[in-house]
Each structure stands twice: as structure tokens, then as C-alpha cells.
Image (spheres, rainbow, N blue to C red):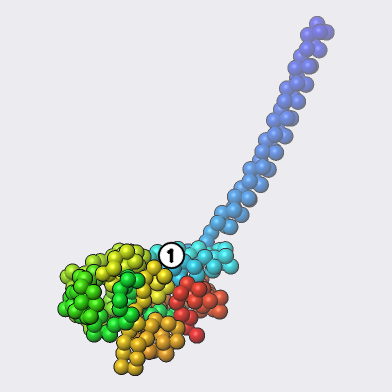
Amino acid sequence: MIIATISVLVILIALVFVFEQNDTQNTDNSLSIEEQNNVDIYDNDAEIKNEIFIKGSDTILPVSIAESEAFMKLNSQDEVIVIGGGSSLGIASFIEGEIEIAMASRKIKDSEIESAMEKGINPVETVIGWDGIAVIVNKKNTFDSLTIEQLKKIYTGEVSNWKELGGEDEEIEVLVRDTSSGTYAFFKEHVLEDEEYTSEAVTEPNTEAIVETVASDSSAIGYIGLAYADSSVKMLGLETTEGTFHPEQESILKGEYPLARPLQYYTDGEPDGEVGDYIDFVLSDLGQSIIKEIGYLPIN
């Protein structure tokens, strides 16, 4: 009987001990969960970023990529997403409200401004740098310069062989960008005077492809943004009544080079918030030094 009583007491003590242990564990777990929740909340806040979407000109693309990387190092709360595709594509996406900044190597058209205003978007232009469209040929090409009139004849198809201009007897391989390119539109306006490109022209998907083709084809001619020019091709001078000028800093900034042009961003209204901060960075001394490093010209 005594043994049985002792056994019951032992069991009861053991049960009390188990209940106390479980209660302690539940309390600890409750605190751990609360602490974990606090950590999660903090982490989620830290992951929230202000996204800036930039889209458009392939000419400006390397600038915006470099600028965005430098900007994000200084502003960890901001994320800048940069996409190329051409000025027209960027402006179209901007009009639809899909992006915060459109990159354009040509001026926005009146029809595009009208479409934007109809959707409640007010396009405001910010010039971020300067470019000179470089006309390039193969390094074996005997020409060092051409007139704008000669360029027009080549690109409209009136001249189709280099010998017609005093060069080698070789059919000219005319290279152009696609129609969404701002460079395509600028060249058509300022060289072709809005006449149509020759139907024999070969459309390249991007500027890099034009450089590669010209470097490997002795008959080819193309046009590119200045930053894409390298030692694999020859940049032609452009002859004017004032002399022959190359796409160099002095002639571009003085307005002597015939194919000089501004590079611009378009925003909905005056840029403010994180978009304003980003554009202020691009216009800062550091941002302008990046533009120069890429191969374009700063605004000052």
C-alpha cells in the first residue's frame, strides 16, 4: 500500500514537471516568434526600393547603365532599371505611363507630345549630354571624308558604287538602324532631308552590329553614336563650306560638325522625387564625368 502511494506521488510529480517544462517551452517559443516577426518586418522594410524605369535610345543606353550603377551605389534605397530598344519605343512606353524616363537621341515629335497630353502626361525635356553621329567605313576604304550631299546620294540609292565617287569599283553596302531608332530618324531628317532610305539598305538590329559589319566588310558604310566608335573602323570627316570636320568635342560644341545632336531624357513634368534625384546626379560633376568617360560630351 505504501509502495503504491509512493508510486502515485512519483507519477504526479513527474507530470507536474512535464507541464512546467512545456509551459516554459511555449513561453520561449512565443518570444522567439515575436522576435522573429520583428526581424522580418525590419527586413521587409529594408527590401522596399524606389524603382525608376528608364527605356529608349540605344545611343544613350550605355550612359544610363553606367549612371544608374553609380547612382545606386550612393542611393541603396533606389533601384534603376534601364532598357534599350530605340528612342521611339522608349517614348511610346513613356506615353503609356509604363516608365518614368524615356531616353531619346532625337527630339520628341509634336504628335507624340499630343498623344502624351491626351493621356495626362506632360513631357519635359532634360538635355544630359551631346553626341556627334559618326559616319564609319571599313579601314581599307580610301575615303577620309564625304560631303552631306554625297552621303544623301549613297543613302537614297542614287549612288550605289564607290567608283561613282572616285573610289574602288565596289558596290556600296548601306547599313541603317531600325525605324524605332532615334539615330535613324535624325539621320533621315538631317542628311536625307526626309527622303526615303534606299530599298537596298540593310537594317541592323543595333549599333554594335553596324560596327561589326563595317569592320569586316570593305564596301560597307554606316552611322553610329560617337561612343560606339572604336579602332576597328574609320570615322569619316564631313565636308562643309567652312571646312572638313570630324565628330570631335570642339567641332561638336561649336556647332561646326553637321551631325551634332543633344541627348535627352523625357519625364512627366519637372523631375522630382527619386526621379529628380537621379537626373540631378546625371547632371552633377560626377554624372557628367561618366558621360565623358562613356564617349559623349558633357553639357558644360
Asked if residue 125 shows in the view, the reply is no
> Measured along the vertical axis of the image, is residue 294 above or below residue 5?
below
> Measured along the vertical axis of the image, is residue 145 above or below residue 173?
below
- Residue 175 lies left or right of residue 51; in this view the side is left
Q: Nearer the viewer, residue 8 or 300?
A: 300
- The residue under the point 39% across, 68% down is 232
Q: Position of residue 188 (x, y in %)?
A: 25, 78
Give the quadrant of the N terminus: top right
| Image quarter of residue 56 | bottom left
- The residue under the point 58% across, 67% down is 74
> Measured along the vertical axis of the image, is residue 80 above or below residue 246?
above
Q: Nearer the viewer, residue 224 or 273?
A: 224
Asked if residue 30 shows in the view, the reply is yes
Residue occupied by mark 1? 82
Q: Position of residue 18 (x, y in %)?
A: 72, 25
Q: Position of residue 235 (x, y in %)?
A: 36, 76
Q: Identify the residue at the far bottom of this view.
A: 242
- The residue under the point 56% across, 63% down is 77
Q: Nearer the viewer, residue 169 or 189?
A: 169
- Residue 223 lies left or right of residue 271; in this view the side is left
| Image quarter of residue 93 | bottom left
